[in-house]
Image (cartoon, grey):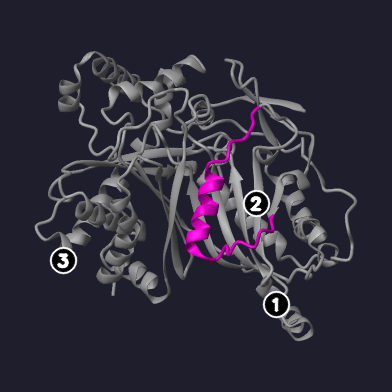
Amino acid sequence: MQTERPLGLLEKFQTSKYFVNCYGAATFTTLLRHPPRPRVSASDQQHDTIKQFYLEHLYSPMIQLVQTHPQLSLVVADWTQPTIHFARLSEFDLSTIVHVDTSNKPFWDRVILSDIIAQECDHEFDFDDHTIPLWHLRIYVHQDRLDECSLTLTSNHVVLDGSSTATFWRELLTELNKKDDEKQNTSTIHENYIIKSNPEKLLLGAYEDRHGPMPTSWELLDLLMRKKLKDVLPSGWKQYWFPSGWAGDRRGVTDKAVAHHHTMTRAIELGGTVWKNVCATSKMHHVTPHAAIMAAMMTAFARLYQDQDHVVTHTPINCRSFCKGPPVVPQDEMGNFVGNYTHHWVSPYLNNNNLHHESDASFWDKAKHYYDHLKMNKTQGAKDPGKWKLAPRFPEDYIKTWYDNWDANPMARSGGIQLSDLGLFHVPNNHQQHKKEEKKDMVDNGFKNSWEVQSVWFSQSSQMMSMALSVTSVSTKSSMYSTVTWQKGALDESKIEQFGPLVIDILQKLCQ
């Protein structure tokens, strides 16, 4: 095992969540159609045979990804100490991090899919286990669908941010669909599935070391003074001077012995002509589809919570382009390069005179209001990781910050709503360059010999001590896929169950 660099600010922040049990993992799930598995009749051989089928297809592609991205070989060493740092595994066994579920769950059903995603979002990686990396793959299959599966990448946020999971999937799909004779020769069974890391591929610096924007000394001083003032103010004055807005329906559990993240998830989607209309109508109003989703979320929230006059939203920002280097950060570099834009929603953008029949004009005014402010404040949002400079001692300052949320906020969480949107996921189409060969495959074999994406779902754990509600989103050219997540017990389920369908309904009606 090779010793690597110390963790950066964002990486320490992600690690600190595990001291207080407030976060699980980030996930990216893809429903796939692929070359059919062999039908297995003997139940005692079913699991091993199916797992070997996927290992044979994944092995060569994963070798390529691990050789390219050092983050896929990382573990965290000295994770409870100020000397916390990354270490790189010299090798690991792919078969130990590919898990196959053969219980025949109908993974394509959106309710079942939601449960699968929620379970993976709550997975906790063992920082003391230095035999496997901080990610794994979980596959669900069904005996009636031999040419389909659900495949989830589950990763610890300390090594991969949301954009990294999308990069992982783009490159994996590209590799799976390469016409590599050795890979396509499924009659060859490997003796083992050991993957060696690439010591020549350097693990580059953290966000702040790549000269991402950082707060000025005056900005840090302002943050520090606000924090100290909040610590000494009585609760009534605290809410008056530092209003946090909506923070959920029920106070969080504050018993350290039992407080733990428990993710609830609902999958929602918008496809076909409707999603294309959303994209086209957004462009016509000079905003992005992302802004339209946020406007629909705020409209849905206002309908469900008519007594609320203030809510804060958080928008994670991909900050790779803000890093001036050296070296600069390309969009396909894995790691943690995430800022945060905070937006305060109040009247008239939160409340409407006619909540159930919002006019086109008021909806697009809301979207434009958010779009303009996000655009103007992206650089400021890219400074957000720098606030952790105010926590120089690891891990104690980070832990104190988390537990302060219990004391500083009436609902025992900082509150608000997050929209984490990966935007457009470009589905690799490299099999098109082999059009003639694939046409022959279809004639000879009765199917297209490639791995085809049916749907994609980005998600992450509930955030027990911070956001009350999270929406994670990713889109293709033809559809938008989102998950709505929250901490179990934090929200009124009669309302939250309506939230996702309301968002979809609003977008459908306003973008016809």
- Estimate the x, y position of residue 9 in percent, counting from the top left: 50, 26
Q: Nearer the viewer, residue 492 or 334?
A: 492
Helix, strand or loop at mark 3: helix
Q: Amino acid at mark 2?
A: Arg
Residue drawn at x 31%, y 36% as measured from the top left: 415
Which residue appears at 78% of the width and 71% of the height? Answer: 39
User: Label 1 belongs to which residue?
Assistant: 448
Q: Is residue 188 magenta?
A: no
Is 470 left, or right, of 358 in this rendering? right
Mark nearer the N terminus (3 vs 1): 3
The range drawn in magenta is 101-127
Which amino acid type is shown beneath numbered disc 1?
A: Lys
Which x, y percent locates residue 53?
Answer: 78, 61
Question: Where does the image place residue 460, in percent across and percent down from the top left?
Answer: 49, 45
| Mark 1, secondary structure of its residue | loop
Find the distance from the CA under tag 2 to the CA under tag 1.
24 Å
Sequence-first tag of 3 and 2: 2
Q: Quadrant of the N terminus?
A: top right
What numbered label is drawn on residue 138?
A: 2
Whether residue 49 is visible to the viewer of this picture, yes or no, is: no
Tell me: 120 left or right of 359.
right
Residue pointed to by mark 3: 357
Residue beneath the point at 82% across and 48% down: 193
Q: Does residue 35 sit above or below 401 in this rendering?
A: below
Q: Nearer the viewer, mark 2 or mark 1?
A: 2
**Amino acid type shown at disc 3:** His
Which corner quadrant of the image does residue 361 belong to? bottom left
Residue closest to the far left: 353
